[in-house]
Structures are given as structure tokens and as C-alpha cells.
Image (cartoon, helix red, strand yellow):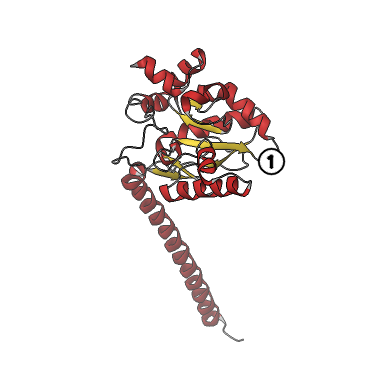
Amino acid sequence: MVNCNNNYSGYERKRALKQHSRMRKNHMILQLISMAAVIGLLWYCINGLNLKEVSPEPILSVGTGSLDISSDVIEKNDTDETLWSLILVNRWNAIPEDYDVDLTELSNGQTVDTRIYPSLQNMFDAARADGVYPVVVSGYRTAEKQQSLMEEKIAAYKAEGYSASKAKAEAETWVAVPGTSEHQLGIAVDINADGVKSSGGEVYKWLKKNGFRYGFILRYPPDKTEITGVSNEPWHYRYVGIKAATDMQDQNLCLEEYLKEKN
């Protein structure tokens, strides 16, 4: 009779060793996973609470993203409105030489003063909720860009047969002389329709009715041309703060008239 006990015992030992090895590997993997979880938790506790709140996506040409900005944030913007949001810039009042602006870029490449961004986003969200789709077609402009626009407008009038002096005079009723444009402040925007879901007329109508609720005014209304020095521009909206915008809306005042009464 052949004795198989030794062979059998060796097989069992090998099997036990393999099983033990697998258990050790599994145990090591579980330890590594646990360590990674602990390290991640520690990192969040140390750094996570100090992270700045991520800014929402800038205003889209066509989009549905919303930004919930509480009223206290907007009111905080209004507390120093006499320092920046009510600054008067027109053909008789140039931008102060020391004026500086911090800009936020929108998704279509336009930029605006960072301080008006929350209110502008809220206004666009409200318009979209009403089925109106506005687009910022012009925000902040440099002096060079403003000069280029002026030259283009003068050239267009000359092409229509206007004399040089007449072309310049007419151009200045539509395009501000560099240094006197609200666009150089970063708190004025030209708003139009997306051209797909809304028309220009729909956007202008909505803005005229609701813009003041978000601190924006129609800066150059048709019945105030002699006061503002600029022809009617239903697309040009300027941030002045909710309180000032509401007062101007209620009393049918342009910015020049409001500031005159305020002083």
C-alpha cells in the first residue's frame, strides 16, 4: 500500500499559505483605502473650509443657469453708491483720471465691473424666466476701443455725404467722445436679444419695465436727449443701484435730473 500522508499534508500547507497570502493582500488594500479616506478628510478639514466660493458661470448668450444672490449682497453694493454707482459721466463730465475698474469676464468675451455682475446676472435670470433672452453685446470699453467706434461713426456719416464737421457732430450724438463714455466705467452695458428666442423689441420692452428692480436704468430715454446729450438708445442700461433706479423710475428722471435733485 502506498503511503500518501506526506504528499497530502504538503498540498494542504501550500493551499493554506496561498489563502493566507490572499488575505494579507486584501487586508493591505483595505488599509490603503482607509488611509486615503483619512488623508482626504484631513485635507478637507484643513483646506476645504478656507476655499473661496466658486464664481458662477458668467452670463451666457443663451443659457438657463441661475445665480441666487441674496438681497443683503445687493444692498451692500448700494451702501457706497454715491462713490461709484452714481458717478456722472457725459459729454460735460469726463471720467476721473484716477478711476480704476476691476473686471469680470462674461462667457461671450465681454467684461463688466465686478460689482455689478451679481445684479446683472439676476436680471438676466429673471428675463429668461419670463421667456425673454437678452445678451450683453457691449460692456466695458477701453479708451482706444471708444476712439475706434467714434472714427467708424464719423466715417459712416462722411460716406453719406456729410461734411467733416457735421459728421463729427452727428457721430457725437450716438458715440461718446473717449473719456466721456459710460462704457469706460464698466457699469454700463448694451443689451440686445439673442436673435433666436427673442427679438430686440421684446428685450427692450422687458428691460424698460423691469430693469430698475435690479438697479439698472435706461440711461438715454427718448424724452431726455437734451439733458443727457445722447440720442435715444433703448439698449443702453446703466447700473445705479436699486434705490436710485426705483426713484428714477417712479419720478421719470434721468441720471442728470436725479443727481441735481439729490444735491
Residue 140 horizontal/vertical position (percent): 45, 43
Residue 23 horizontal/vertical position (percent): 47, 64
The quadrant in which residue 90 appears is top left
Q: Residue type at mark 1?
A: Gly
Mark 1, Cα crowd under 10 Å, few <14 / some 14-19 / many 20+, is few
Q: Is residue 66 visible?
A: yes
Vertically, is 227 above or below 41?
above
Q: Is residue 214 visible?
A: no
The residue lying furthest to the bottom in this view is 2
Vertically, is 51 above or below 173?
below
Between residues 260 and 54, which one lies in front from this camera angle?
260
Residue 113 horizontal/vertical position (percent): 42, 39
Vertically, is 108 above or below 8?
above
| Residue depicted at 49% across the width and 13% down the height | 251
Apparent side of residue 14 relative to residue 127 in the rendered image (left or right): left
Pointer 1 residue: 195
Residue 37 horizontal/vertical position (percent): 41, 52
Vertically, is 44 above or below 218?
below
Between residues 149 and 140, which one lies in front from this camera angle?
149
In the rendered view of the protein, which quadrant contains the C terminus?
top left
Marker count (numbered): 1
Between residues 170 and 104, which one lies in front from this camera angle?
170
Apparent side of residue 210 relative to residue 43 in the rendered image (left or right): right
In the rendered view of the protein, which quadrant contains the N terminus?
bottom right
Between residues 84 and 59, which one lies in front from this camera angle?
84
The quadrant in which residue 89 appears is top left
| Residue depicted at 58% across the width and 33% down the height | 235
Q: Secondary structure at mark 1?
A: loop
